[in-house]
Image (spheres, rainbow, N blue to C red):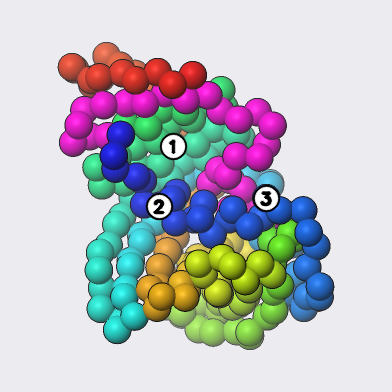
Amino acid sequence: MKKILVFLTLLVATANVFAQTKSPVSNDPEAKKVLDAVSAKFKTFKTVKGNFSLEVKDANGKTQGTKKGTVYMKGTKYRVSITGQEIFCDGKNIWTYDKGANEVQISAFDQSGSMITPQKLFTNFYDKDFLYKLNGDKTVAGKTVQEVELTPVDKSKPFFKVLLGVDKTSKMITSTQIFEKNGNRYAYGMSNVATNAAIGDDMFMFDVKKYPGVEVVDLR
């Protein structure tokens, strides 16, 4: 499958640093309080559903593209729907469906815990190989948002800074900005987040019967 799901690809590119084992030199304890609160709050949810948007800008500030979609999470299960693609994960298998090609690739879910998933982007994603500091509060759409700045200890990474916006009341990440060394900027936002709604397990499985003529590529 030639196309790549933009949402997960960009966030995984950012989060790959988290899989390292080296500890950061020093960090802002106030920023850690904010990030710990985000992680603790997310772990209380049985299910999460939310809309997301992704905007890409070049070094001149010109928008190069935008994507919108929906993400569902339940335990280790998740489903991501975005223009042209869908990813289903039932905690054992991952189905990546390309709508244009009417093709689905099936791969095994990594049970070791090293695989980056949407859930990991909200829980304990910050304690390895990142320095972080609290930039202060901002008012966004009438809400108080705490901005946390993260910088990778490994300076060979293609990005040099990540800004997280955390709703001070809900303790949820509402926005992420990734700053690349080449000047590109990726802005990701979450909205309309609903928690603990009833979501059936079939939501996280790809049903071949619903996709007539789909080509199945089993990579397990």
* Amino acid at pointer 1: Arg
Q: Residue at x 33, y 66 (%)?
A: 55
C-alpha gap between disc 3 and disc 1: 22 Å
* Residues shaded magenta: 98-124
Instruction: Give the quarter of the image for residue 117.
Output: top right
Coordinates of residue 154 in the picture (x, y in percent): 66, 67
10 Å crowding of disc 1: few (<14), some (14-19), many (20+)? many
- The residue at which mark 3 appears reads as 19
Tag 3: amino acid: Ala
The residue under label 1 is 79
Q: Position of residue 9 (x, y in %)?
A: 43, 50
Which numbered tag is attached to residue 7? 2
| Circle 3: element type | helix
Is residue 104 highlighted in magenta? yes
Mark 2–mark 3 CB contact (< 8 Å): no
Residue 171, image x, y percentages: 63, 64
**Which numbered disc, 3 or 1, marks the residue that appears first in the sequence?**
3
Decide which of tag 2 and tag 3 comes sooner along the chain.
2
Q: Is residue 172 above or below residue 93?
A: below
Residue at the (51%, 77%) spot, across then down: 143
Based on the picture, tell me whether residue 13 belongs to the magenta stretch: no
Using the rendered view, name the quadrant where residue 186 is placed. bottom left
Image quarter (top left, top right, bottom left or bottom right) of the N terminus: top left
